[in-house]
Amino acid sequence: MKTCIICEAKIDLDKLIEKHEVHFCSPECLAKYEEKLKELDKVIDWDKCC
Amino acid sequence: MLLGHRRAAHRRCHSERSGAMSRNQLLAISKTRQSLIPRFPRDDRVVTDQSNLMNNFILQNNDDSPLDLYQYQGDKNLLLIFFRGAWCNVCKKQLIDVSRIMEELAAQRIKVLAISSDTKLKSSLLRTFLRLNFPVLSDADLAVIRAFGLETEDNGQSISKPAIFLVAPNHEIVYSYIGERHDDRLSAEEILNNVKISLNQKL
């Protein structure tokens, strides 16, 4: 069974959303992923390293 | 699981620190670094123990499908890239660098796979964000990282040392480079040059 990349819930096949080569259990989780993607410049601090 | 390898290694220090940078700026830096001259003689390559063979392992793709290393490699050479994590800018630059030379690597019959101790979510976000054209896998329990003898600590967290391994189709490790510091990396051009030399030696 597939798990949601965001909430790690098991996904019923009829609710499975495939995008970005990963799986989501709901449009909300997909939206969260895309939000994280948009904010990645902030999440990953380009100014600091190691 | 595998290998006791002798770690010698050629090292190169590029202790560049980035200012506030966008992805495009990072790409620009990657391009300038292409002009670095590779300087690794043949005898400098790192070899593993007598057998030199890499055992198989299975990791999960970010979509939960299993990735069997031998199956993924098929009859090609395999470039394994171990990196510290999505938070490491030097790692990101190196991954972008490698994605730029994928055609040249493919011409050498080389497939690429990147591994870190990041979660699947971080691995997936990093791959999507950097538009990498090779798998970026999570080894969150460090099973593979430990098997390669790459585990190290950073701020109390277990992560992988930066390293690359070139594995021939018979699973022999024909080249490796293990960074001893976070910024101890090969440029894309150096990687390309060294894997070509190693593959020619193998012939």
Image (cartoon, rainbow, N blue to C red):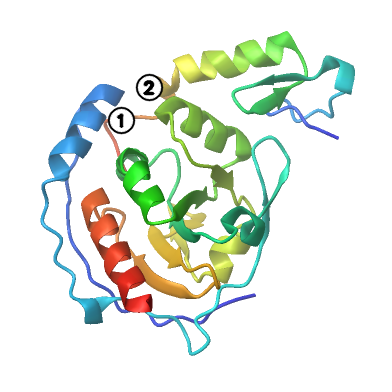
Q: Position of residue B169 (x, y in %)?
A: 53, 67
Q: Is residue B22 left or right of residue B81?
A: left
Given contact means CB atoms under 8 Å apart, are the residues at marks 2 and 1 in contact? yes
Q: Secondary structure at mark 1?
A: loop
Up-down: is B117 above or below A10? below
Q: Quadrant of the N terminus of chain A?
A: top right
- Residue at the (23%, 82%) spot, across then down: B43
Q: Position of residue A2 (x, y in %)?
A: 80, 32
Q: Secondary structure at mark 2?
A: helix
- Residue at the (18%, 36%) spot, across then down: B31
- Residue at the (16%, 44%) spot, across then down: B33
Q: Is residue B16 visible?
A: yes
Chain containing mark 2? A
Q: Residue A41's mark?
A: 2
Q: Residue A37's mark?
A: none
Task: Point out the tag, 2 or 1, that comes first from the N-terminus.
Answer: 2
Q: Is residue B185 left or right of residue B5?
A: left
| Among the 4 quarters of the image, the one containing residue A20 | top right
Q: Residue A46's mark?
A: 1
Cα distance between the residues tagged 2 and 1: 7 Å
Q: Is residue B132 left or right of residue B22?
A: right
| Among the 4 quarters of the image, the one containing residue B69 | bottom right
Q: Amino acid at mark 2?
A: Asp
- Residue at the (80%, 19%) spot, across then down: A16
Circle 2 Cα neighbour tier, 10 Å, few/some/many (<14 / 14–19 / ≥20): some
Chain containing mark 1? A
Residue at the far bottom in the pictured view: B50
Q: Amino acid at mark 1?
A: Trp
Circle 1 Cα neighbour tier, 10 Å, few/some/many (<14 / 14–19 / ≥20): many
Up-down: is B89 above or below B80? above
Q: Position of residue B120 (x, y in %)?
A: 62, 38
Q: Position of residue B136 (x, y in %)?
A: 52, 42
